[in-house]
Image (spheres, rainbow, N blue to C red):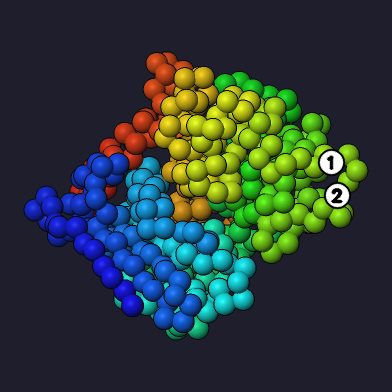
Amino acid sequence: MTTMENRPATGGTAAGTRGAGATDIRTSEPLLRLTWTDPVTGAQGFLVVHTLASGLATGGTRMRAGCTMKEVEDLARGMAAKTATFDLPVGGAKGGIDFDPKDSRAVEVLERFCQAMRPWLDAHWVTAEDLGVPQHLIDDVFDRLGLEQSYHAAISRAPHPERTLRRVQAGLNAPVPGGLLLGDVIGGYGVAQACLGAAGAWGWEHETTTVAIQGIGTMGGGAAFYLHEAGMPVVAVADAAGTLYRPEGLDVPALLELRDAYGEIDRSRLPEDVQQLPRDAVIATDADILVPAAISYAVTPDNVPDVAAKVVVEAANSATTPEAEAMLAAREIPVIPDFVANAGAAAWAWWLLLGYVDADPATSFHRLRTEMQSKVAMLLGSWDVDGTPLRETAWQLASANREVLAESPDVSIP
């Protein structure tokens, strides 16, 4: 069963088309809120389409116990900001399911949710992995539904969808150093570039700049790997079982080998010199950069006094509450907002769809590195000059870009 709420059309053009982007993303109402109830388990699922551009919106589908409509709405707004910040000709959306992804029925719940959302997934909503839903799983579901791949709504618009699908699959499955695939690491690579961009903007040497990462799944693990590759010591990582700490820097590749399917590290195989601390200890780690890469609302007014980092890089969506961010700013600790720092996967997916990058990882890494570091440098430049919060500068950039995109021709998928 589904229930739906729409907002009225505004601005003299069809709601959700090019004219809808002219509204301030921060204050505009979502185009659509949809609630679904699973007929088998009673679990609830949500789709929020914040903005459509050329009839398309993009945003992942997450699954976690306790997921709410408000959470999904905030994430959809963030996706609209991501697409605008990176000049992508598409709006923002998000899907969410209130269900434990470790439950044996989770895949069946996900499949029924996608079946219920099929009118949107067929033609308007380009989704992908998110918390609790890895890319291979959602692609398997799409394949069983006859949609082949989770980017279906965009791929189906191409003159030759089969050729576009092959290009997308080649990019997603391109091997990268470390034995992983490009589609699995590109988001974490983008977060790493946000960290490296902050260090570069402030003249910090990589070898002496330390990082603490909350979360060691797809995003946090990818960020840890590429920061380690760049010579930046990752001194602490946290998963659901606790924080692992080594002040000289952790052997990140070795730790990643100890992860299970849920991003948790096997403690029985840890080196003896790795300290095991409580899960929340990562927030207070003595490190230059703190990367919350696990859950939303991880940094709150309650734990802000514990933050020892000089900058917070939001790898998780809505990782810092507004009140906590204001408290950090008062302590002169800037926050690189989620819709910049963790936008790499979304930006790259659309670059791949639009043919701007291909299956060569070097091309993708170069483009994302260049764009992410330049944006971070711009945000920190405004902060250094007059203390303007990075989120405020990023919102201004997103709104300006959305105004320009609103006048652009409809998106064409090659």
Q: Is residue 141 above or below residue 305?
A: below
Label 2, residues with CA under 10 Å away: few <14, some 14-19, many ≥20: some
Please tell me the numbered disc located at residue 36. none
Which residue is depicted at the point 30% across and 41% down? 26
Q: Nearer the viewer, residue 324 or 333?
A: 324
Which residue is depicted at the point 81% across and 31% down? 248
Please count the marks in the image: 2
* Residue 230 x %, y %: 70, 37
SS type, badge 1: loop
Q: Is residue 101 above or below residue 68?
A: below
Q: Which residue is mark 2?
A: 270
Position of the N terminus, as image quadrant, is bottom left
Residue 317 visible in the shown view:
yes
* Residue 192 x %, y %: 61, 41
SS type, badge 2: loop
Position of the C terminus, as image quadrant, is bottom left
Q: Amino acid at mark 2?
A: Leu
Label 1, residues with CA under 10 Å away: few <14, some 14-19, many ≥20: some
Which residue is depicted at the point 24% across and 58% down? 31
Q: Amino acid at mark 1?
A: Val
Which residue is depicted at the point 56% across and 66% down? 100
CB contact under 8 Å: marks 2 and 1: yes
Q: Nearer the viewer, residue 294 or 166?
A: 294
Q: Is residue 355 left or right of residue 314?
A: left
Q: Is residue 380 left or right of residue 91?
A: right
Q: Is residue 87 above or below residue 322?
A: below
Please tell me the numbered disc located at residue 274. 1
Q: Is residue 69 left or right of residue 213?
A: left
